[in-house]
Amino acid sequence: MEKYNKALRYEIFENREYGFLDEIIKNSKIIFDIGWHVWYFTEYCLWLNQDLLIHFFEPVKDFLDEAKNRLRYENIYWNNSAIMNKNWFHNFFVNQEKNMQSSIFNQTFLNPEWTISKIIIKRLDDYIDDRKFDKIHLVKMDIEWSEFDVIQSLGEKHLDMIENLCIEYHILDRNFENKFDLIIDKLKNNYKNLDIMPSIYTDKVWYIFARK
């Protein structure tokens, strides 16, 4: 795992995988890190802007505890839960070697070996409403094939609150292709600028970058 984590750190801090978000991060006050590269995206954001408030979501308690131990910042709100389109408990397929590829799905190319953990799942709109946000400056979402359902569950009120949205996604089958078309239409109706970009590492990973 250590070798894998070093490679992730290189991608984010040296190769600047999220460099297209730098100016947004520097000018933000509230960021949601939903799905993580270990904890490196949150660390990257705080490296650029130490005045941020970050809401960090990780459903596996051991992984969350490790992140807490590594990131000793007071301005992180820790959430031991996943984000999806409903509030419930669910089986979670945990990839112990490459933990960022854990998912509620087990039939995928990225998570061929897994152990099962029971996790808490929350709706993003409920989380936003409970905390009475006016604006969220950036939501980064990398939740292994659940992103499309989350976007579909958000109403215009909540999309209006989210100024910038960065989604990492994978197209796995026809069902995901249909969901992709639906959320692109929805985002086009709520954001002035929308880019779809390939990862520099693999053609199986893409980004949706939406901004007001």
Image (cartoon, rainbow, N blue to C red):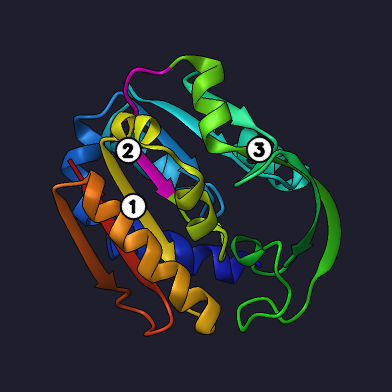
Whether residue 134 is in magenta: the answer is yes
Look at 85% across and 55% down and name the residue there: 117
Image x and y of residue 119, in percent: 79, 46
Amino acid on which disc 3 is placed: Lys
Whether residue 39 is in magenta: the answer is no
Image x and y of residue 36, in percent: 52, 51
Query: Which mark sits nearer the N-terminus, 2 or 3?
Result: 3
Q: Residue 122 carries which label?
A: 3
Q: Quadrant of the N terminus?
A: bottom right
Of tags 1 and 3, which is closer to the observer? 3
- Res 133 → quadrant: top left
According to the picture, the residue beneath numbered tag 2 turns out to be 138
Magenta segment: 133-140
Mark 2: few, some, or many residues within 10 Å (few <14, many ≥20)? many
Amino acid on which disc 1 is placed: Cys
Image x and y of residue 110, in percent: 61, 78
Q: What is the chief secondary structure element of the magenta stretch?
A: loop
Q: Which mark is residue 166?
A: 1
Look at 41% across and 69% down and name the residue there: 180
SS for callout 2:
strand
In the image shown, does 18 or 43 lie closer to the viewer?
18
